[in-house]
Amino acid sequence: MASRRSVLQSTLLLAGGWGGGLAAQTAYPQRPIKFIVPFAAGGSADTVARLLSERLGLALGQSVIVDNRGGNGSVLGTDIAAKATPDGYTVLLSNGAAMTTGPLMGQITNYKPLSDFVHLNLFGTFTNALIVRADHPAKNVQDLLNMIRLQPGKINYGSAGVGSAGNLTGELLKQLAKIQMVHIPYKGSGPAFNDLMGGQIDFMFNALIASAPHIKGGRVRALAVTGHHRDTEFTQVPTLSETVPGAVGDAWFGLSVPAKTPVLVQERLRADMARVLAQPEMRAKLAELGMQPLGLDKPEFQTFLDQEIKKWGPVITAGQLKAQ
């Protein structure tokens, strides 16, 4: 019969084994997590980040605090995230300007978009709308294309700036439809919209969520949306690709972490965010914000990035687009 001491030792060892395993499972997270958003507060990216951070925090059992670090086309905040301690306590709202199209246009970065990060979840894409003033003679995309062809180099469009989703979509349309039009870059979509209403530009690509009140109010007309599918609210508005096949151009947002973040921590973040993105209520709220929810996990996210590079690289080269 084993002595009382040996039984006690065995019990303590067993308890230590279970306790050690439990500690390993619950060690992360032990403090609040910083969610770097490389855009100013108040925009669509910030709104999405705050919505998701709240739900992710509930899933993790810790606060997820949004830290807005806008600047340099979202490169500033992305660089901060790349240099953060890779312990899972700094995560990034990743986006195309910082990870794919910006570097393709020669944007100088101190990070490598694909190797300095692990890209965990692709939240979804933001659809733009091709809008004109309500009194514009073009009633549909084909009308607009006909006008441009009759006046090559005379019709202009505005965007939030060189390399913005609106500019890239405009360049894609220009190349696919074989038309000549002039791009007018602005410092943000607000000034571009003001000039659209003032008649200084003919049309623009603007976030559908921002354009929606003006479409409903009759101030502007949406000729098309730029996503793969028609919008669930504006079902009467066709996609741009229905007239010009392949003309799809959306902004996207995802969750990424520094490359050396421990695999177990990566998996915890990935799995919990995947569950958040799968919630019907969450998908409905994202849709209300103008996002087409995707909820793609790590392998599909990487495939998506590869496809974006293959898609936009030739467009940027042919259009001679350069980061400013």
Image (spheres, rainbow, N blue to C red):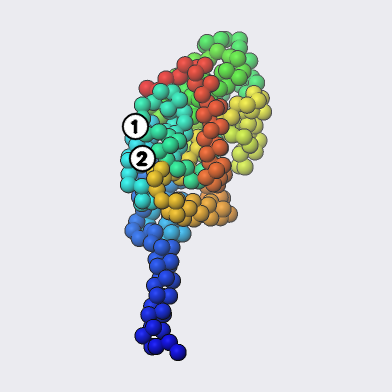
In the structure shown, which secondary structural element does the residue marked by tag 2 occupy?
helix
Q: How many other residues sit within 10 Å of disc 2, few (<14), some (14-19) or many (≥20)?
A: many
**Which image quarter is the N terminus in?**
bottom left
- Of the numbered discs 1 and 2, the one sitting upstream in the chain is 2
**Which residue is rendered at x = 63% and y = 36% of the image?**
229
User: What label does residue 110 carry, if any?
Assistant: 1
Task: Kindly identify the amino acid type of the residue bearing the numbered disc 2.
Answer: Ala
In the structure shown, which secondary structural element does the residue marked by tag 1 occupy?
loop
Residue at the spot of label 2: 82
**Which image quarter is the C terminus in?**
top left
**Which residue is rendered at x = 65% and y = 32% of the image?**
238
Numbered circles on residues, count: 2
- x and y percentages locating residue 164 in the rendered image: 45, 28
Q: How many other residues sit within 10 Å of disc 1, few (<14), some (14-19) or many (≥20)?
A: some
Measure the alpha-carbon separation of dots 1 and 2.
9 Å
Task: Kindly identify the amino acid type of the residue bearing the numbered disc 1.
Answer: Asn
**Which residue is rendered at x = 54% and y = 46% of the image?**
297
Q: Is residue 174 above or below residue 225?
A: above
**Which residue is rendered at x = 63% and y = 26% of the image?**
246
Determine which quarter of the picture holds residue 140. Answer: top right
Q: Are marks 1 and 2 in contact (CB under 8 Å)?
A: yes
- x and y percentages locating residue 305 in the rendered image: 52, 35
- x and y percentages locating residue 195 in the rendered image: 44, 23
- Horizontal relation, residue 28 to residue 168: left or right: left
Q: Is residue 9 above or below residue 159?
A: below
In the image, farthest residue toward the bottom: 1
